[in-house]
Image (spheres, helix red, strand yellow):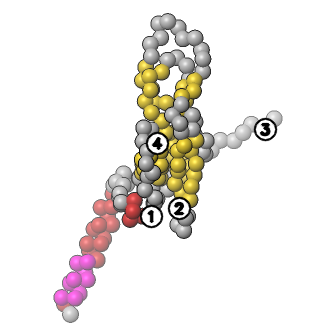
Amino acid sequence: MNKIMSTVALSVFAVMLAGCSANNDKTVVTVKSINEIAPYPQAEEGYTRSIIYLPELKNEQNAKVELMIGKDMLVDCNLHRLSGSISQQELKGWGYQYYVVNSNNNGISTLMACPLDVKEKMEFVTINNNLDLINYNSRLPIVVYAPSDLKVKYRIWSATNEVKSAVIE
């Protein structure tokens, strides 16, 4: 009986200790293999599957994620974009979302005459994101299928607790 009680007490202590250490460091992201989460499809030929694991936040409802898909290109003074679109798909039977990028990698730009002293520079040129910002959810990864020559980057947007009132006229 004493062996059972000491084993149970030791197990409870180990669980409490693990819980304390996990709560002290909120920036750690537990990464599982995507196949352990759900049966996301493999990337088609010419595409890569990029996975974004988000860290847990205190108020995730106040944060959004912006996808930025593009590539580094040599650009001049004009505004540059890649043609293409991002579509949201549903993983059948699971209800999870994933995103597919369609692009022919053709660049579009404004046609301003650049001053002679302006040199070309490397810049990350993106597809015009036709999606709204994605709800922040650290419990599920964001899965993106994009052409192999494009990079998937993201930006996290968050709101402050400050609320302001409009002026009434």
Q: Earlier in the sequence, mark 4 or mark 2?
A: 2
The amino acid pointed to by label 2 is Leu
- Would you place residue 21 above or below residue 45 in this image? below
CA separation in Å, label 4 and label 3 = 50 Å
Q: Which residue is mark 4?
A: 147
Q: Residue 133 magenta-drawn?
A: no
Q: Which residue has dot 2 on it? A: 91
- Residue at the outermost front position: 45
Kindly report the distance in space between the C-alpha atoms of the residues bearing marks 1 and 2. 8 Å
15 relative to 100 in the view: left or right: left
Pointer 4 or 3: first along the chain = 4
**Residue shown at 54%/68% (left/top)?**
93
Residue 3 visible within the image? yes
Q: Secondary structure at mark 3?
A: loop
Callout 4, which amino acid? Pro
Give the image quarter of residue 6: bottom left
Residue 154 image position (x, y, % from top left): 47, 42
- In what element is the residue under mark 1? loop
**Nearest to N terminus: mark 2 or mark 3:** 2
Q: Amino acid at mark 1?
A: Pro
Query: Outermost residue toward the bottom?
Result: 1
Q: Residues within 10 Å of mark 3 (few under 14, many from 20)?
A: few
Provide the residue designation for mark 3: 168
- Which mark's residue is nearer the viewer, 3 or 1? 1
> What residue did someone put label 1 on?
39
Give yes or no for contact between labels 1 and 2 (Cβ–Cβ under 8 Å). Answer: yes
Question: For the residue carrying disc 2, how many other residues have a C-alpha within 10 Å: few (<14), some (14-19), or many (20+)?
Answer: few
User: Where does the image place residue 8, in percent across and percent down from the top left?
Assistant: 26, 83
Mark nearest the camera among 2 and 3 is 2
Q: Nearer the viewer, mark 1 or mark 4?
A: 4
Task: From the top left corner, tell me how far across and down residue 22 is, in percent.
Answer: 33, 61
Tell me if I can see residue 153 in this picture: no
